[in-house]
Image: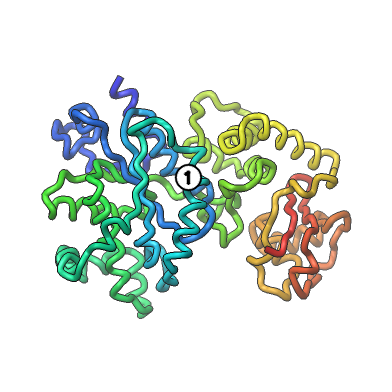
Amino acid sequence: MMTDKFTWLRRGISEIFPDRPDSTNPDENLLQRLAKSDRPLRVKLGIDPTGADIHLGHSIPVRKLRAFQDAGHTAVLIIGDFTARIGDPTGKSEVRKQLTSEQVRENAKTYLEQVRPILDFDTPGRLEIRYNSEWLSKLDLANILELLATMTVGQMLAKEGFALRYQQESPIYIHEFLYPLMQGYDSVAVDADVELGGTDQKFNIAVGRDLQRHFGKKTQFGLLMPILLGTDGVQKMSKSLGNYVGLSEDSLSMYSKLEKIPDDQIEQYFELLTNLALETLPENPRERQKLLALDIASQYHGREAALLAQKTALKVVLEGDMSQTEAVPEFSLANVEFPAKLFYVVSASGLCKSSSEARKKIAGGAVRLDDDRISDQNLTFDSPADLDGKVLRVGKKNFVRLVKN
């Protein structure tokens, strides 16, 4: 029974560390920790509210947190209201803009609402929501010096993002070195047994283990999950790239984007974003896309709304019925610099994978703006107002409504 639960908890995991499956030591083997612990494990996930929205890529560790809740463990969701003021430098080629405490508080409110459909907020003892300002704001200079003394500059520069910036002679500010230490100190403060994160978080999670050891605590296990590719199937899901599915999107927008996921990505989406048994999935690729879109839309909007979205999307595709354009997926023109050529808008919206592909689609007569077929590859628009509210289509199945904000 314990092995079955562990198999489910491991679904979609890229790496567990430490992971010595032959060891009977509960500090080296997570299955032993699960079996021998006389209490529910404390499973930590930290999220920094650096923006207002969460997309499906962000939901992956949150879903794993729910899996641990369902297995009887305690989810410790840490809202990084203090660390968000610095911003995680992981994967960044330059220093992040520091946020105000007011911006962080507003973002935190929206984050909690967006993860509510995923986590169990109701069962007593299954969820702790903590804000890391609770302990980080109380650290004095002596405490900070103690944290800094646990790591060398060489170790910090081994962190991928820092190493690249150092080689490129891009500025690295001293306060950025504090970020991994503060995230690691969160694990000390909440007595974490397990910390969840993407594969890009291994360094930070390992720092948490080192700090727990430094402060005489039991060390946590790190569980790393893949970084989700976006709807383009090329780059990681990102709002700035326009290849994302937001958790707060309406059911039709969510369904319409997900039923177009590339065939080579769809199994990963099922594994990471659903609870469906992978061996029972339909063989037909189109049926897989529809099942994926229906299942995920149902998670956030309910089965009835998801079925209505499926019906509406089919009507738009088969009949070209634009009478329901208020429900068509939206693309914000705020992501485009104007004046802009239409082929660039087509590419930026995610309807084509590149500008060159967008040019070919326009030349081939596959692009429409509302009901007008566009054939001029160099058609240029001076401002977002020229496109606001219009429906951009590529072929029959791909469409977005363009909006200014």
Q: Please give the name of the residue rendered at 32% of the width and 55% of the height, measured from the top-left corner.
A: 132
Q: Please give the name of the residue rendered at 26% of the width and 35% of the height, measured from the top-left corner.
A: 41
Residue 266 appears in view = yes
Q: Name the element at disc 1.
A: helix
| Residue found at the far top of this picture | 1
Q: Give how far across and how far down residue 257 sits, in percent.
A: 65, 46
Q: Please give the name of the residue rendered at 38% of the width and 39% of the height, measured from the top-left corner.
A: 65
Judging by the rendered image, the residue that carries numbered circle 1 is 59
Residue 288 appears in view = no
Q: Give how far across and how far down residue 188 sits, in percent.
A: 21, 51
Q: Please give the name of the residue rendered at 48% of the width and 45% of the height, measured from the top-left corner.
A: 59
Q: Give how far across and how far down residue 9 sits, in percent.
A: 36, 32
What is the quadrant of the C terminus in the image?
bottom right
| Residue 150 in the figure: left or right of residue 114 | left
Q: Nearer the viewer, residue 136 or 217?
A: 136
Q: Is residue 277 above or below residue 127?
A: above
- The answer to which image quadrant residue 290 occupies is top right
Q: Is residue 140 above or below residue 207?
A: below
Q: Nearer the viewer, residue 351 or 240?
A: 240
**Three-letter code, disc 1:** Ser
Q: Nearer the viewer, residue 103 or 181?
A: 103
Q: Count neighbours of disc 1 (C-alpha within 10 A) and say few if under 14, some if 14 to 19, many if 20 or more.
A: some
| Residue 194 in the figure: left or right of residue 88 | left
